[in-house]
Image (cartoon, coloured by chain):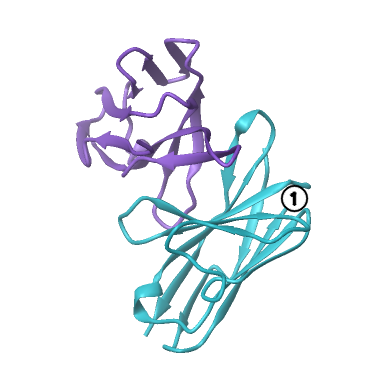
Amino acid sequence: QQQVKQSPQSLIVQKGGISIINCAYENTAFDYFPWYQQFPGKGPALLIAIRPDVSEKKEGRFTISFNKSAKQFSLHIMDSQPGDSATYFCAAKGIISGGYQKVTFGTGTKLQVIP
Amino acid sequence: SAVISQKPSRDICQRGTSLTIQCQVDSQVTMMFWYRQQPGQSLTLIATANQGSEATYESGFVIDKFPISRPNLTFSTLTVSNMSPEDSSIYLCSVVVSHNEQFFGPGTRLTVL
């Protein structure tokens, strides 16, 4: 119930195309859904996040779509650029047990944007 | 936001030895976290470190193997004890600041021979 399933595992997109990464969760206690971007040799960096009271959040070329009833959320990268090539992790956060918040990470998607 | 630094950035260690990883944050934070990320894998929480109390370990991680110190609100250490090649991984320090935002350090890449 604490799992966050992420797909695809890897993704190759042409420059200028749209990259789409999907995540699904089970536990309705999750109430915060961030996405992280990680370049090789670096720690994950917070990219964008959403709460379940909104269905979409956009920041520049990055958009989160959230479907509460389906317990799914996705990251869309518009006009993908080679500099977007990285591994992306979705995550879900909520009070799961013991009264404190826990973050569960997806398995990651390695995105490659080719010129 | 929070700026997190870790030392060392990488190390190569011999089997049976121990390594202490330091994490420094540029602001005071209540909760700090230590994660492990094996090559090409996701992040696994090792423990939560609160200042002034014992660290809380996740299933599969024990204090004897991964002792943690949290002497103040800006600093923590994680020790990887009696290392084996299976401990080769990236170890990440993380903090939560306002509005649920979680930030990660650059990581310590550990190789155990």
- Residue B66 in which image quadrant: bottom right
Q: Which chain is cyan?
A: B
Q: Is residue B87 above or below residue B102?
A: below
Q: What shade does chain A have? A: purple
Q: Residue at x 42, y 46 (%)?
A: A38
Q: Residue at x 48, y 10 (%)?
A: A54
Q: In this orientation, does residue B91 appear?
A: yes
Q: Is residue B105 above or below residue A14?
A: below
Residue A13 % position (x, y) = 21, 32
Mark 1: amino acid: Asp
| Left or right: residue B43 compared with residue B62 | left
Residue A113 % position (x, y) = 26, 36
Closer to the camera, A11 or A16?
A11
Residue B60 % position (x, y) = 42, 63
| SS for callout 1 | loop
Quadrant of the drawing holding the C terminus of chain A: top left
Q: Residue at x 58, y 40 (%)?
A: B102
Q: Residues within 10 Å of mark 1 (few under 14, many from 20)?
A: few
The residue that disc 1 covers is B26
- Residue B53 in which image quadrant: bottom right
Q: Is residue A95 above or below residue B20?
A: above
The chain letter under disc 1 is: B
Q: In this orientation, does residue A16 appear?
A: no
Closer to the camera, A98 or B19?
A98
| Left or right: residue B42 compared with residue A101 | left
Q: Tag count in the figure?
A: 1
Quadrant of the drawing holding the N terminus of chain A: top left
Residue B84 % position (x, y) = 39, 82
Q: Is residue A60 above or below residue A85?
A: above
